[in-house]
DNA sequence: ACTTTGACTTGCA
DNA sequence: ATGCAAGCCAAAG
């Protein structure tokens, strides 16, 4: 599957072990739930490694991975950043039953999921 | 090997 | 509440 290929790809990278860790966590996000970079980072025992989580997401975007729903990962603000269709992600989340507030941010208090 | 940047977060002004 | 700065780990130049 795409994930294996991706893992194999990053397997060459020495310190990308936690990358796979991030993918695992994100992959476990159930439908209708979202999580934040900070939460994932915290789950990885790296409370300040949120940016690297974002890096992993970026890698997913390029790898077109469907096992790892990056669209369910949002920032602490509940919104989304990145040149890759934030609108599409929002729509995708809406399709999964995730509610957005009037400001277009995910209601983390409702859908926030943490491992 | 060093510097800059990045799908971030938090703190202080 | 808004704005700027620092901190953090890792990858790319």
Image (cartoon, coloured by chain):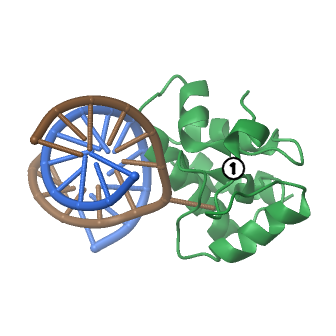
Chain colours: A green, B brown, C blue
Up/down of A73 relative to A14, above or below: below
Up/down of A96 relative to A34, above or below: below
Depth check, front residue: A97 or A81: A97
Q: Position of residue A86 (x, y in %)?
A: 64, 72
Q: Position of residue A71 (x, y in %)?
A: 72, 59
Depth check, front residue: C12 or A89: A89
- Using residue A5 as the reference point, say whether residue A80 is left or right of it: left
Report the residue that reaches farthest toward the top: A45
Q: Residue at x 53, y 42 (%)?
A: A16
Up/down of A3 relative to C6, above or below: below
Depth check, front residue: A60 or B9: B9
Q: Residue at x 79, y 71 (%)?
A: A91
Residue A40 falls in image quadrant: top right
Quarter of the image with the C terminus of chain A in it: top right
Question: How busy is the neighbourhood of tag 1: few (under 14 within 10 Å), some, or many (20 plus)?
Answer: some
Output the chain of dot 1.
Answer: A
Up/down of A86 relative to B2, above or below: below
**Residue highlighted by disc 1:** A7
Depth check, front residue: A65 or A103: A103
């Amino acid at each position: 599957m795409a994930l294996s290929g991706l893992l194999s790809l990053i397997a060459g990278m020495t310190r990308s072990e936690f990358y796979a860790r991030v993918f695992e966590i994100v992959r476990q996000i159930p439908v209708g739930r979202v999580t934040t970079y900070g939460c994932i980072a915290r789950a990885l025992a790296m409370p300040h490694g949120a940016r690297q989580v974002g890096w992993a997401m970026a890698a997913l975007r390029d790898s077109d991975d469907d096992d790892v729903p990056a669209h369910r990962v949002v920032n602490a603000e509940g919104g989304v950043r990145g040149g890759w269709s934030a609108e599409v992600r929002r729509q995708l989340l809406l399709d999964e039953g995730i509610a957005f507030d009037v400001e277009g941010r995910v209601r983390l208090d409702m859908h926030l999921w943490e491992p």
